[in-house]
Image (cartoon, rainbow, N blue to C red):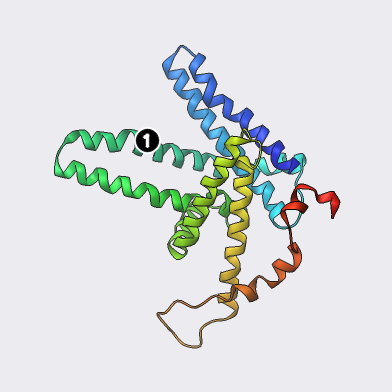
Amino acid sequence: MLRIVLLNLGFLASAAIPVFLPGIIPIPALSITVFAAGILWCCIYLSTAAISLKAVSDYGVCGPADFWSNLKTAWPAGIAAGVIGLFLFALARIVIPFYLRIKSPAGLLLAAVIFWTLPFALLSFQFFFAIRARLDTRLLKICRKCFIIFFDNPAFALFCLLGILLTLVISLILALLFPGPAGILLFLDEALRLRLLKYDWLEANPPAEESTKRRIIPWDAILIEEREKTGTRTLKSFIFPWKD
């Protein structure tokens, strides 16, 4: 919990750059540049935090030295995530209103297509940092696997997105200190780690013959080892762990 709070404090300090600095810069071009640079740095920070929190998801620990070491390898994915985020933001705020102002069937159709593309992109790219931390470092491969995870597990992706929204509501009550962005990154990394057990099982248990039907995944059997590692946790033990 302390590590998560410290990572959230670092993110809040980073977020102050795009939130507050552009408003006090009188030159518009420089203000926009600072805003974009601040967004990119926040994404680099999140990418680094995701790699660091992977150790926690794997029943390990992470410290300040790990964070700075991970920063050296995380920054390309962070910049890519920032560019993708700014592009989707531009689609929502600039491109869709532009086509709506055309007031023609073609404009409405293009606006509708882009509008419905955004939720699919959001559901897919929510796994971007987790996939970078756990599966691949090549940017095109990361994007491809984002869509593979979504289209192969749409209900799982929707559940994760709802989990993020619920976590954000709780985080706002606690001033983003906990669970906050770091808690969301840990949640997504753990969700992806457990979901990948499905593919390990499918690889170890190939079908006897080709079938178009989806196979039933025996999650109770797959998660036996995970449940033995984590044990049983109650709300009381979470709040008062020293009483166990």
- Residue 236, position as x, y percentages in the image: 76, 52
Establish if 158 lies above or below 16: below
Disc 1 marks a residue whose amino acid type is Ala
Image check: 228 left or right of 85?
right
Other residues around mark 1 within 10 Å, as few (<14) / some (14–19) / many (≥20): few
Task: List the single residue furthest toward the top.
Answer: 26
Task: List the single residue furthest toward the front.
Answer: 236
Disc 1: which residue: 90
Pick whichever, 108 or 30, lies toward us.
Answer: 108
Q: Is residue 75 visible?
A: no
- Residue 156, position as x, y percentages in the image: 50, 61
Q: Quadrant of residue 229?
A: bottom right
Question: What residue sits 57% from the left and 45% below the top?
Answer: 167
Image check: 187 left or right of 142?
right
Q: Quadrant of residue 67?
A: top right
Q: Secondary structure at mark 1?
A: helix
Establish if 228 lies above or below 90: below
- Residue 32, position as x, y percentages in the image: 45, 23
